[in-house]
Image (spheres, grey):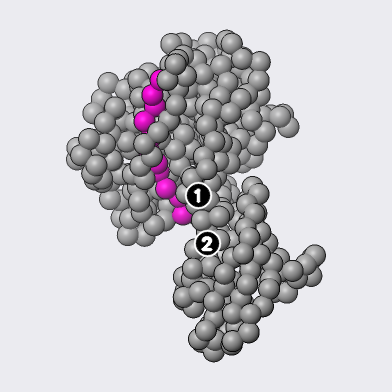
Amino acid sequence: MRNYLLFIVLFQFFFCAAQTDTEVYLFDISSDKNELKISNKRNISNNKGYDNQPSFYNDNIVLYASTKAGQTDIAKYNIRDNKTEWISSTLQGSEYSPIKIPNQKAISSIRLDTTGKQLLYQYDFKTGNPKVLLENLVVGYHCWYNKDIIVSSVLEDKGLSLVVSNLENKKNTTFQKKIGRSLHKIPNTNLISYVSKENEQWEIKSLDPISGETKKITNTIPGAEDMCWLLNGTILMPKGNIIYKFNPKTDNRWSAFHTFSDPEIGNITRIATNSINSLLTLVSDISPEHIVQQQLDAYNSRDIDAFTATFSENVKVYYYPNKLSYEGKENLKKGYAPFFENTPDLHCDITNRIVYGNKVIDEELVLINGEKIKAVAIYEVENGKIAKVTFL
C-alpha cells in the first residue's frame, strides 16, 4: 500500500502538476547558405488547456497529447489537410507521450488510469484499440530502439531510472538511476541518448542498449533537459525562448540557433523534428508578457473570472520590497470582485513595460473614480500563470 501511494504522488508530480496551458507549434526548416532556419509558425493544437509531447508519425502527421472533455487523449494533426483527429478516447484514463512504433501502423503511449495505474500501451493507428506493452513497469517516458526493444524512463522511489526492455524475452534491465525524460535515437548510429542527472551539472549521454555501454556526449544547457537531434548530428536544446545548438563533432560549446521574439513563444518545454529535418515542432507555455497582457485586458473589462484565471492558485501579492499583502487566488478574487463592481470607469494604461525572463515590469496609469493614479507592478510568471505580484 505504501508503494502504491508513493506511485500516486509520482504520477501527480510528473503528469498532473505539469498540466498548464500549453500549445504545440509547427515550423518549417529550410537551408539558407548552408545554415538552417525555421519559419512559418503554426499553432497546430490551438486548444485551451494541456497540449504537449509532440512527435512525428511521418512527414505529414504530428502526434501529441491533448486535453479533451476533461481528460488527455492522443491527437493526430494532418499537416497537409490542416486537420486534427483523435486516436484515443479513454474514459478510464488519459494518454501521454505518443510515438510511432517501428514497422507498424500503431503508436505507443503511456496511459494513466483514474485509479492511478500507469502502463505503456500500444494503440492501433486507425481504430485506437489498445493493448498493454509492458506489464510491470511504471513508464514515464520512452523511445523505441527497434521493433522489439524499448528504452524507458521508469518511475521509481527516487525519480526516473533508465531501463531497457526486450519485448521478445520479457527482460527489463536497469542501467542508471537519476535520469531525465528526454530519450532519443541518435541519427546514423545504434545508440540512444538520454540526460543523466547523477551530478549537479546534467549531462547528455549515449547508451548502447545491447552492450549497456554509456558515454558522455556533453553537458546540457544548465537546467534544460528537452532536446532533439538533427540528421547531421547536431543537438537542439531549448531553454526559455531560445533554441541552442551543439554538434559534438565540430563544436566546443553551445550557441544560439534561434531566439523567439514572438510573445506566444515563452518557455519551450518540448522539441522534435521529422525524419528528414524539414519540419520542427515545439511546445511552449504562454509567454510571461502574453499572460500579463491577458490579465490587463481582463482588468480593463472588469471581468473577474478572466482576471483571476491568469493567476496561480497560490499567488502571492506584495508591497515593495517584500511585505506580503495576501496570498491565494481566492483572496485575490474577494478583493477585486467588489472593486470591479464599484468602479465603472476603471481603466489601466501601460506607459512603459520591461520584460526580463519570467518577470514583467509595468509602469501604469490607472483611472479610478475619475482620478488618475501612477503605479508600478512587477509580475512573475511561472508555468503559464502569474505567481507573484509586487506593487511599488
| Residue holding disc 1 | 263
Specify the amino acid type for callout 1. Answer: Pro
The answer to if 226 sits in the magenta stretch is: no
Q: Is residue 73 left or right of residue 239?
A: left
Q: Closer to the camera, 363 or 145?
A: 363
Q: Residue at x 36, y 60 (%)?
A: 70
CB under 8 Å between discs 1 and 2: yes
**Can residue 235 be seen in the rendering of this structure?**
yes
Q: Is residue 192 left or right of residue 148?
A: right
Residue 270's x, y, as percent? 48, 38
Residue 34's x, y, as percent? 45, 15
Q: Is residue 145 above or below residue 376?
A: above
Choose top left, top right, bottom left or bottom right for residue 215: top right
Q: Is residue 355 above or below residue 148?
A: below
The image's mark for residue 150 is none
Residue range in magenta is: 18-31
Specify the amino acid type for callout 2. Answer: Gln
**Can residue 185 be seen in the rendering of this structure?**
no
Mark 1 Cα within 10 Å, few/some/many (few <14, many 20+)?
A: few
Residue 148's x, y, as percent? 36, 20
Q: SS of the residue at dot 1?
A: loop
The answer to if 24 sits in the magenta stretch is: yes
| Residue holding disc 2 | 293
Q: Residue at x 49, y 63 (%)?
A: 294
Quadrant containing the C terminus in the rendered view: bottom right
Question: How far separated are the C-alphas under marks 1 and 2?
Answer: 10 Å
Q: Residue at x 30, y 44 (%)?
A: 75
Q: SS of the residue at dot 2?
A: helix
Q: Is residue 387 left or right of residue 189?
A: right
Q: Give the total of numbered labels.
A: 2
Q: Main secondary structure of the magenta part?
A: strand
Q: Earlier in the sequence, mark 1 or mark 2?
A: 1
